[in-house]
């Protein structure tokens, strides 16, 4: 089905062919990490949703498994959800999406459903479905993307929804057995559609250190200067969840990844207690050039989350180091304009580190370019702390994404390039940008500054 390999990623999870969107059911079961995803196998355009399935021992090498969930028919499809183990079984909890009219996708109903497996490979939809048959009374038909976890003696579920007043919100339910669910109420609400969106997709609630984090992907946020640029956002509220009162006390919504291509992220708790996140590395309104080649969709590298000084950090997981096959460079010297020379510039990991405290220059840049044309660039401005990422194939006005670094005493860039994607992690995950780019030429890579700076630059070729 894939007719041309030119944009295929080598070490990211991507569709085997056909359409992919959200990661689903990210979990650990009987010695394997499991990762499902929204999948339409029969075309590179989105269609009646299935759950595709991969598993892995190390979160780096993935094995494709048979489709886990298929729609009953074109009108009854399987939307996003999560997975949880109970008594040696893996349960998938997903949204059943019913189109009332295939010619009018605004007419639909959403219910919550369950499927199970004893071997982690073959899944059966349960006879009790739906386990939640209708949205609460003060809600519209938008009621989806269940994430389930265990807390004390109960299982909890968080759902994305739209209140009857047209604003996004997250709802919680609880259960003792995964089948009978008691509605608890909303735990967070958009204040205005412009700021926090009209529908919250793919919510996730988890504890990180002393804080509880509500992750969600609101639709319909208005572009807001440096704060938000994508209409669809993935971000978080940090605060404290009181499970007794079903009350989440929290701060403002904050963007999580500042790139063009990051949405519908989901987390899992690894056996060693790391909180690991993976996101869809695309965006609903993207142009998807790979559709011409019979496929569409990739996921980010897995990222480890941590919370410090009021901020959520995302770092590439340590396991990714096992992809390093060859050292491209390890240099320490004054960088003014440095070309990274490597036989495989589209499959590499780069690290740049400089102490900037007594440096009198102002800008440090990275560029990925092809035939003297920039594909993607990143520039840090020391004075303002602002980081600007420019993706040249986007129309003017939508080509830039911004973020801010709190510290100016040092700059650390950690970069992963994979055929048609580039992920930037700055200062140990304080700021992250995920981008897709498309070229058929061998690109060139440069680090440059407006004034020479002593820096350490390291690079590796990556391969599976
Ligand atoms: C998010 C989303 C979910 C939904 C799924 C459908 O990208 O819109 O809300 O369950 O995708 O594929």
Image (spheres, grey):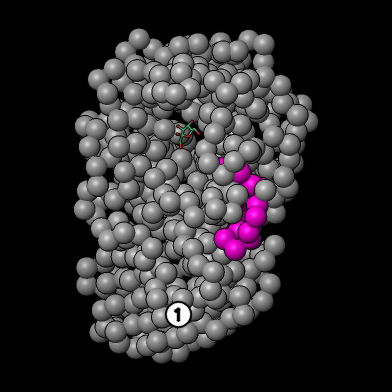
Please give the range of residues in magenta: 2-20
143 is higher (above) or lower (below) than 213 = above
Residue 372 occupies quadrant? bottom left
For residue 35, say whether it is visible.
yes
At x 34%, y 24%, the residue is 162
- Count of residue discs: 1
For residue 244, say whether it is visible.
no
At x 49%, y 79%, the residue is 444
444 is higher (above) or lower (below) than 83 = below
- Measuring from the top left, give residue 21's x and y in whole percent: 52, 41
| Residue nearest the viewer, comparing 103 with 99 | 103
10 within the magenta span: yes
Question: Which element type, helix, strand or loop, lies under badge 1?
Answer: loop
Task: Please tell me whether the stretch drawn in magenta is mainly helix, strand or loop.
Answer: loop
The answer to whether residue 231 is left or right of residue 131 is: left
363 within the magenta span: no
381 is higher (above) or lower (below) than 37 = below
Say few, some or many: other residues with alpha carbon within 10 Å of mark 1 (under 14 / 14 to 19 / 20 or more).
few
Kindly identify which residue carries mark 1. 371
- Measuring from the top left, give residue 181's x and y in whole percent: 52, 13
In the rendered image, which quarter contains the C terminus? bottom right
The answer to whether residue 337 is left or right of residue 99 is: left
At x 45%, y 11%, the residue is 134
């Amino acid at each position: 089905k894939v007719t041309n390999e030119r944009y295929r990623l080598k070490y990211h999870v991507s569709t085997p062919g056909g359409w992919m969107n959200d990661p689903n059911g990210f979990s650990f079961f009987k010695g394997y990490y499991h990762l499902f995803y929204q999948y339409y196998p029969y075309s590179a355009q989105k269609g009646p949703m299935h759950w595709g399935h991969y598993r892995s021992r190390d979160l780096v090498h993935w094995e494709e498994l048979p489709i886990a969930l298929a729609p009953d028919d074109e009108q009854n499809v399987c939307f996003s959800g999560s997975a949880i183990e109970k008594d040696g079984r893996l349960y998938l909890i997903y949204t059943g999406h019913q189109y009332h009219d295939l010619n009018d996708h605004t007419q639909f109903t959403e219910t919550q459903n369950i499927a199970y497996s004893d071997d982690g490979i073959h899944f059966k939809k349960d006879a009790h479905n739906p386990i939640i048959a209708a949205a609460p009374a003060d809600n519209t038909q938008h009621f989806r993307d269940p994430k389930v976890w265990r807390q004390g003696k109960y299982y909890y579920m968080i759902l994305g929804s739209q209140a009857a007043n047209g604003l996004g919100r997250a709802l919680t339910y609880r259960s003792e057995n995964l089948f009978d669910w008691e509605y608890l109420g909303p735990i967070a609400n958009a204040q205005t559609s412009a700021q926090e969106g009209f529908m919250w997709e793919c919510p996730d609630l988890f504890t990180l250190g002393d804080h509880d984090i509500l992750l969600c992907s609101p639709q319909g946020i208005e572009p807001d200067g440096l704060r938000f640029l994508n209409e669809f956002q993935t971000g978080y509220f940090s605060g404290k969840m009181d499970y007794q009162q079903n009350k989440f006390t929290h701060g403002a919504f904050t963007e999580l990844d500042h790139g063009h291509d990051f949405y519908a992220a989901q987390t899992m708790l690894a056996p060693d207690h790391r909180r690991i996140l993976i996101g869809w590395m695309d965006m609903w309104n993207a142009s998807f050039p790979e559709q011409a080649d019979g496929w569409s969709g990739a996921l980010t590298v897995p990222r480890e989350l941590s919370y410090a000084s009021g901020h959520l950090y995302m770092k590439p997981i340590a396991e990714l180091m096992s992809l390093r096959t060859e050292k491209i460079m390890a240099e320490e010297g004054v960088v003014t304009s440095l070309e990274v020379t490597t036989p495989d510039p589209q499959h590499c990991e780069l690290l740049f580190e400089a102490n900037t405290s007594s440096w009198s220059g102002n800008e440090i840049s990275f560029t990925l370019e092809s035939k003297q044309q920039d594909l993607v660039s990143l520039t840090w401005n020391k004075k303002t702390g602002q980081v600007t990422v420019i993706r040249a194939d986007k129309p003017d006005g939508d080509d830039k994404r911004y973020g801010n670094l709190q510290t100016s005493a040092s700059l650390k860039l950690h970069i992963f390039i994979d055929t048609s994607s580039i992920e930037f992690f700055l200062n140990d995950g304080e700021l992250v940008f995920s981008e897709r780019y498309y070229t058929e030429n061998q690109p060139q890579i440069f680090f440059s500054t407006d004034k020479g700076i002593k820096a350490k630059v390291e690079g590796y070729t990556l391969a599976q």
